[in-house]
Amino acid sequence: MVNASPLHPPAARARLISPATWALLLGAWVVVGLFSFYGSSWLAAPLTPGVAGLSFAVLLATIVAASFGVVHEADYLAHKLGEPYGTLILTLSIVSIEVILIASVLLGPGEAPTIGRDSIFAVLMIILNLVMGICLAVGAARHGEQEFNAQGATAYLSMIALLTTVALVLPKFTSTAGEFGPEQAMGIGVLTALLYAAFLWKQIGSHKRLFVQPPPGAMVVRRMERTSRAPTETEKAEGSVQQSRKDVWVHSLLLLAMIVPIVLLGHHLAVVLDYGIAAAGAPVAVSGVLIALIVFTPESLTAVRAALGNEMQRAVNLCLGAFVSTVGLTVPAVLAIGLLYDKQVVMGISHMDTALFVATAVLSMLTFNGQRTSALQGYMHLALFAVFAVLLFFP
């Protein structure tokens, strides 16, 4: 008879999936079932404020809860696999949800040609200014100046400057103002996807050291170092490796099981959002902001916790990496939908938003140009987000 490893006692193995996780999965899939069978009648035109409000509350609660479930499972995998793999899994999972919701709105009953552009720009302002500003401010309040890997931050910011300029600024100067022509859309989509894939390949390969927390007093990681502790004698015991692999597979499947309900409920949320924005007379760009807030709230909280835990490099990976992934995945997806379904896709941002993008890019480059973070820089990022919020409703 093989003795159970102290790290994986029988009780722990029996509860590989916690009761709370089972309850979250069951609740999410019950809502999916209800809207799959009755959603078309509940949300049929003409919608009433009561039905729309209740539907929005249920859909929002389910999607946010499932998003937190995704973050929980991705966070578990992050600690199992180490950096930068763990953060990359979390970021890709969250951004995939955003792409799904944007596609649901774009393919919904209403016309939303600017949803891709609005969502990308909203993520830019929320992640790089609001969330990053909070991380810098609260991290400094608890730990003082915090260290990060300057080379990794520079790599992220270079990708942000290039991809955002091509995706959101360049279309302002094309022959069809604000849009890419079919050939342009195909070329830009393929090039964006290839560049993002190359970035990921280097991030988990030869350039992995750029995204790892540097030693105290350093700005960079000079050589590849082990980022996880050596296994103990107990962990080397028979069955521990197999159990670890089993844990990774189980939590990977749970992560997918949390994402699928979001996919299936995205279309219904798009219908309610269209109705709510039209009824309230709110700017069209608000839909992009709502999608960004819904999707990135769990990851944003994870980044703030990392800053509070003196893990500034992880906060940088989450925030800057999230926006690189947003552009790298959303732009090809939106342009492909436009080509395949003959949908109008407007990508060019306004002159006002261009000014905000330039200010954000310059401020971010200055923020991560030093050896350590500064609370003062955090306040500047928060102030820039406040400007964006004011101009959103009072352009």
Image (cartoon, grey):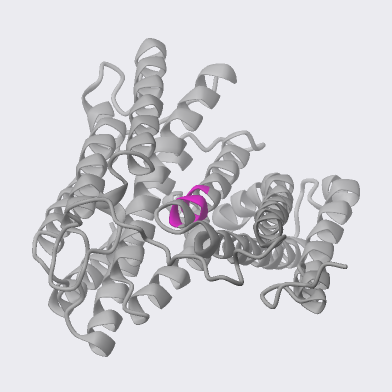
Can residue 57 be seen from the camera position used here?
yes
* Residue 91 covered by magenta stretch: yes
Can residue 125 be seen from the camera position used here?
no
Quadrant in which the N terminus is drawn: bottom right
Residue 286: percent from the left, percent from the top? 45, 56
Spot the residue most to the front.
1
Spot the residue most to the bottom.
142
Left or right of 91? Residue 387 is: left
Left or right of 95? Residue 219 is: left
Quarter of the image where one finds residue 96: top right
Residue occupying the point 88% across, 55% down: 34
Left or right of 89? Residue 152 is: left
Quarter of the image where one finds residue 104: top right
Task: Point out the stretch of residues depicted in magenta.
Answer: 87-92
Residue 137: percent from the left, percent from the top? 25, 80
Q: Main secondary structure of the magenta part?
A: helix
Spot the residue most to the right.
37
Out of 342 and 200, give the one closest to the viewer: 200
Count of picture labels: 0
Vertical side of 81 occupied by 331: above or below: above
Residue occupying the point 33% across, 72% down: 311
Out of 225 and 198, give the one closest to the viewer: 225
Residue occupying the point 66% across, 75% down: 7
* Residue 50 covered by magenta stretch: no
Vertical side of 71 occupied by 146: above or below: below
Left or right of 156? Residue 62 is: right
Vertical side of 371 occupied by 88: above or below: above
Residue 167: percent from the left, percent from the top? 31, 33
Out of 250 and 154, give the one closest to the viewer: 250
Residue 393: percent from the left, percent from the top? 36, 62
Vertical side of 367 occupied by 142: above or below: below
Out of 276 and 124, give the one closest to the viewer: 124
